[in-house]
Image (tube, rainbow, N blue to C red):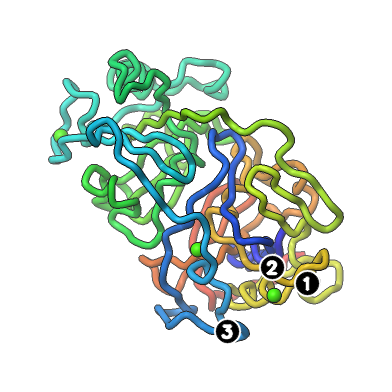
């Protein structure tokens, strides 16, 4: 993998993989190819916001200094649905967000639903809590009313739902078109369901918390969470996604090239954990496969490598032998918890944010 990925560890220091051209990531199991840029526009050091550093200076190479596909959304059907012009996905817009649930309207933004999927091909062996006010009933109603001219509404996968997260803001961490109908009252009560079951733990499913844009699988399917349906008008990508070429792996869906190994900055054959500052620099300074313009991936690019159907590590098998079941840094700072940056834990696919000055060991 790319060297830069390892910036954020957790029990120990985060690892790093570099990524080559700064393109957005993509994802397995989702009907889109390109992730929009994260939305982050400011630079941060290990404590506070800072002027964006010059090349060669400490903390150079952050998310805000590498631009991915710009976020772009188009309202359709009298503003009842929105198309994401980067992913191609079409999203439901909700109505009547006034803090009062109204189950006589499937569009009421305050309604919450229990997770239910009776399809044994997609529910990972656990259908959840089906009955009244469940996600399957909600989706079925949306399709039966042909909402927005579409008949293929469904719950989004965790990767699809995560594309809506805008990490340039919080409360809610989402694009402007969705702000008025997205709940973000607290870090614990702003969860939106995805269709993705937690690998190896089927009573649980993944959700996005739009308070600050973090994702989690600590959600029993019997929990009642908000929902936002998605549908796709583009055929999903097909064919072999990853192609290995020596020390790198190319993602043929989005064109990103990844450092295959976890970064070994000391050159002793053992991958090294680093602080975020060290990881930014290590990725920018990487020379590999005849290329010198490596960088630390942003959180969307890093998340694109997660395979939510696997764990230990939660990544495509082509990377499994060279990936630690541990945390990897992204270049993306946390605008809410200033002084932290985002990481992905490839043990489970969880994300989190950590401070640069936390004591970190070396992963071997
Ligand atoms: Ca960026
Ligand atoms: Ca309402
Ligand atoms: Ca080493
Ligand atoms: Ca360089």
Side (left or right) of 275 relative to 204:
right
Q: Is 310 on the left or on the right of 189, as rendered?
A: right
From the viewer's perspective, tell me whether residue 180 is left or right of residue 267.
Answer: left
- What residue sits 54% from the left and 22% below the top? 122
Q: CA distance from mark 1 to mark 2?
A: 7 Å
Q: Is mark 3 within 8 Å of ligand 4?
A: no
User: Residue 59, percent across and down?
Assistant: 55, 79
Q: Is residue 267 visible?
A: yes
Q: Nearer the viewer, residue 330 or 72?
A: 72
Q: Which of disc 1 and disc 3 is earlier in sequence?
A: 3
At 55% across and 61% down in the image, what residue appears?
298
Label 3: few (<14), some or many (≥20) within 10 Å?
A: few
Residue, disc 1: 287
Question: Gap in Å between the C-alphas at discs 3 and 1?
Answer: 18 Å
Question: Is residue 190 placed above or below 100 in the rendered structure?
Answer: below
Give residue 232's position: percent from left, percent from top.
46, 29
- 114 with respect to 240 (left or right): left
Residue 259 appears at what percent x and percent y? 75, 59
Q: Earlier in the sequence, mark 1 or mark 2?
A: 1
Residues marked 1 and 2 touching at CB (< 8 Å): yes
Q: Is residue 200 visible?
A: no
Q: Is residue 46 above or below residue 100?
A: below
Which secondary structure lies at badge 3?
A: loop
Q: Horizontal and vertical percent for residue 237?
A: 62, 33
Determine whether the beta carbon of the residue marked 1 sits less than 8 angstroms from the nearest atom of ligand 4: yes
User: Which quadrant of the figure shows ligand 4?
Assistant: bottom right
Residue occupied by mark 2: 294
From the image, which quarter does the N terminus lie in? bottom right
What is the quadrant of residue 199 in the picture? top right
Q: Check disc 3 and report the residue beneath it.
A: 58
């Amino acid at each position: 993998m790319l060297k830069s990925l390892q910036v954020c560890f957790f029990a120990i220091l985060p690892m790093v993989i570099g990524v080559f051209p700064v393109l957005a990531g993509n994802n397995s199991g989702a009907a889109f190819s390109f992730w929009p840029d994260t939305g982050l526009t400011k630079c941060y050091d290990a404590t506070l916001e800072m002027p964006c550093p010059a090349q060669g200076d400490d903390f150079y190479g952050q998310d805000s200094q590498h631009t991915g596909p710009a976020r772009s959304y188009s309202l359709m059907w009298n503003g009842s649905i929105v198309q994401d012009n980067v992913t191609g996905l079409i999203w439901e817009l909700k109505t009547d967000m006034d803090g009062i649930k109204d189950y006589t309207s499937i569009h009421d933004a305050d309604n919450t639903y229990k997770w239910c999927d009776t399809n044994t091909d997609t529910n990972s062996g656990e259908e959840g809590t089906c009955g009244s006010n469940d996600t399957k009933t909600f989706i079925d109603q949306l399709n039966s009313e042909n909402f927005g001219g579409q008949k293929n509404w469904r719950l989004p996968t965790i990767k699809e739902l995560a594309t809506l997260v805008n990490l340039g803001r919080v409360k809610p961490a989402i694009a402007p078109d969705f702000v008025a109908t997205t709940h973000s009252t607290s870090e614990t009560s702003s969860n939106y369901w995805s269709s993705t079951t937690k690998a190896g733990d089927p009573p649980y499913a993944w959700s996005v918390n739009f308070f600050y844009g973090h994702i989690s699988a600590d959600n029993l399917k019997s929990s009642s969470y908000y929902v936002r349906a998605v549908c796709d008008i583009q055929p999903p990508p097909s064919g072999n996604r990853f192609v290995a070429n020596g020390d790198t792996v190319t993602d043929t869906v989005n064109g990103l090239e990844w450092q295959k190994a976890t970064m070994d900055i000391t050159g002793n054959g053992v991958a090294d954990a680093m602080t975020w500052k060290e990881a930014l620099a290590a990725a920018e300074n990487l020379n590999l496969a005849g290329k010198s313009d490596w960088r630390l991936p942003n959180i969307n690019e890093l998340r694109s490598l997660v395979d939510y159907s696997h764990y230990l590590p939660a990544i495509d098998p082509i990377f499994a032998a060279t990936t630690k079941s541990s945390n990897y840094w992204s270049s993306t700072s946390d605008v809410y918890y200033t002084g932290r940056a985002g990481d992905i834990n490839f043990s489970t696919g969880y994300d989190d944010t950590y401070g640069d000055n936390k004591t970190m060991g070396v992963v071997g």
